[in-house]
Amino acid sequence: MKNKYTYIWVSLVVLVFGIIFIPKIVNRINSDTVTQQDRLNASTPDSSLSFITLNGEKRKIPNFSFYNQDSLVISQEDYLGKVFLVEFFFTSCPTICPIMNQNLVEIQNEFRDFENFGIASFTINPEYDTPLVLKEYAEEYGITDMDWHLLTGDAEEIYDLANNGFNIFAMANENVPGGFEHSGLFALVDKQGYIRSRRDDFGNPIIYYRGMISEGQQQNEQGEEEQIKILKEDIRKLLKENVSK
């Protein structure tokens, strides 16, 4: 008899929960207010672009110092006050790098008149990609912007910068074409050195922009959508943004 009353009581609790909470959950889903709580999820209510955070702190680009294609030492200080993009690539890449850098050249040409815009391209094959090789690569691709630096240096430092500093995957892998594996993502950085991005349909930051699909191409064979168009839009937003934010 006791078990009978226990089952009745549990049934009533479940019924009450369903009546009170299920409609609220359904409404949140229908209104696209459900968010995923991942480790880099954060946004600011007064900005159209999110600040990416980790442990409650805004992610700022790490310090770095490498040689560019003109054998000049370039650090994060050279990008302060500029909106800029970050990529990890290598000149002998037979797969996604040519597409990525063709997209970046297109972005370079669109923002050529903006002195406060730049690009930082870090090679993940610094042993081969010397300043001279990077210089030839720049000439081949039409990289002419004075603030687009192709950077090379200590391999360990570059891999640490990619995987731990930016969380953009890169590693040597002799089993893949070209001998190096990387994600093909672009990071967007604001004038104060903070990593920024737009939000997805659920209100979460997309964090990085896919660079291996050309504008006008809807998606690639893996079903990934083109994001160069929205990247251009977001660059313009940050170029207009007040530095005091």
Image (spheres, grey):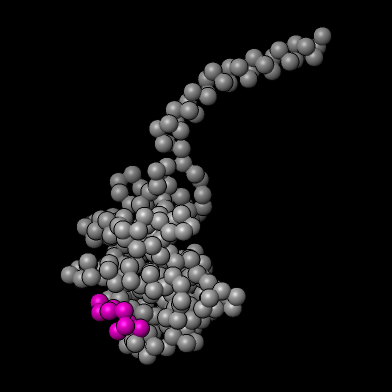
Compared across the picture, whether 163 is left or right of 235 comes to right
Q: Quadrant of the N terminus?
A: top right
Res 107 → quadrant: bottom left
In the depicted view, which residue is nearer to us: 117 or 29? 29
Res 217 → quadrant: bottom left
Q: Quadrant of the C terminus?
A: bottom left
Q: x and y percent of residue 60 in the render?
A: 40, 63
Q: Look at 48% across and 57% down and name the residue there.
A: 222
Q: Look at 41% across and 51% down and name the residue there.
A: 205
Which range of residues does the magenta coloring cover? 137-145
Q: x and y percent of residue 102 in the render?
A: 33, 71
Check the image and report above or below for 196 versus 139: above
Compared across the picture, whether 105 is left or right of 51 comes to left
Compared across the picture, whether 127 is left or right of 9 comes to left
Q: Is residue 87 magenta?
A: no
Q: Look at 41% across and 61% down and name the residue there.
A: 210
